[in-house]
Image: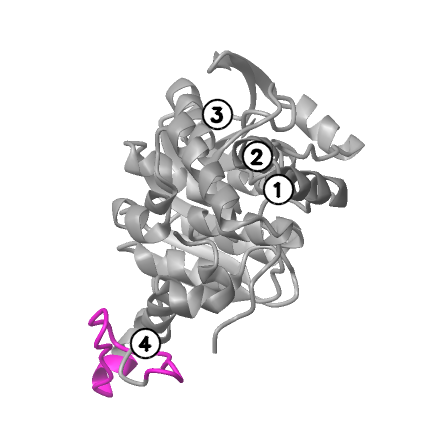
Amino acid sequence: MRPKNSTNVRFPIPRFYRFLISGMARISTDLAAALAERLFFSVPRRPESEGEARMLASARRCQFEYGGRRVVAWRWGDGPTALLVHGWGGSAAQMLPFVEPLRGAGYSVVAFDAPAHGHSEGRTSSLPEFAASLNAVAGRLGPVEVLVTHSMGGAAASLAIAQGLAVGRAVYVAPPADALEWVYRFGRMLRLPRKVVEAMRRRAERRLNVRFDRLNTRILGPAVRMPLLVIHDRADAEVLWYDGAAVAHSVPNGRLTMTEGLGHRRILRDPGVVAEAVKFLVGGEGRDKSEERAAAEAGAICAGCGDPISEYSDSSPEICEMCALERELFDRKLRFGPVGQAYRA
């Protein structure tokens, strides 16, 4: 069964901007596209609690210039580097529940605020800038032994790894699967004409020197060759759990763990999630071998990936559930239906 579309992975759009851009679209496609692009890449600032501020103050603070803007990072302890990467509109403070468990496992923990987030400078950012700043932090404070990401931080990590970042093991919490989907969803939320959405997309692609249809897990996933655990909540209303399943399936050595009732942000503070992530990072198995052996003995082999089937797809009994999810995710007619197709040229 195809899941319903989630809300915007980036941030809710104020009604004022909806009316402003929609009205401008009647006058000038180019002006509407320029304003829409500015809004699409604008970053909402996350408030920081007193407890988070104290925890950050206990670390060694580092800062450096990247792209003409100051990027701020923090480091706790000594040892191999564990890098924490927040998501869109988040901050390093969101990732603090992982700090002490990773330090206890012998790692030196590094967290940073991406451009235009938290303590770092800027008003706008993007997935490529996220990835580039991640690479810059790793170059200054790495090499990176293990990695934990949240939301768009996972997409940024995959792009950084495809660009050459070396990582030993990684955990992605609630990762999105397809940047182009964000563009079309943004257009639907603003009720923009197709020509404005496509003009906005072209402007952004020229400025960033990258095509959005290359920023998805089907393209980037094969480069993510290290053991990867994806943790996603079925009740996530911002990034569909379906996206996490697609990410886990697209990488050569991926595993998916589902949670219930934690949503998109509380999942980062759940002790069980943190413990499972740390256990995996220190060397836990990437797959449940007992399930694979049982499936193999029963002769159940997926026609899509060739792996033993431990969970069948209801819609396609000859393939596993993960292959069925991938098939639906990357078939845009299935993924979006008639409404999503409205923004395609």
Residue 326: say if magenta: no
Residue 302: say if magenta: yes
What coloring was used for the rendering? one colour
77 left or right of 270 in image: left
Q: Residue lying farthest front? A: 27
Who's the residue at 32% across and 76% down the image?
320
- Dot in front, 4 or 2: 2
Circle 4: residue type: Cys
Could you tell which of marks 4 and 1 lies nearer the N-terminus? 1
Where does the magenta region start and end? 294-316
Within 10 Å of the Cα at label 2, are there few (<14), some (14-19), or many (20+) other Cα atoms?
few
Circle 3: residue type: Asp
Q: Name the residue under label 4.
A: 320
Residue 246 got which mark? none
From the top left corner, tell me how far across and down residue 97 is, in percent: 63, 43
Q: How far apart are marks 4 and 1 (CA)?
A: 47 Å
Q: Distance between the residues labelled 3 and 1?
A: 58 Å
Within 10 Å of the Cα at label 3, are there few (<14), some (14-19), or many (20+) other Cα atoms?
few
Q: How far apart are marks 4 and 2 (CA)?
A: 48 Å
Q: Residue lying farthest right? A: 50
Viewer-side residue, 157 vs 30: 30
Q: Name the residue under label 2.
A: 28
Is residue 271 visible in this depiction of the protein? yes
Element under label 1? Answer: loop
Element under label 2? Answer: loop
87 left or right of 202 in image: right
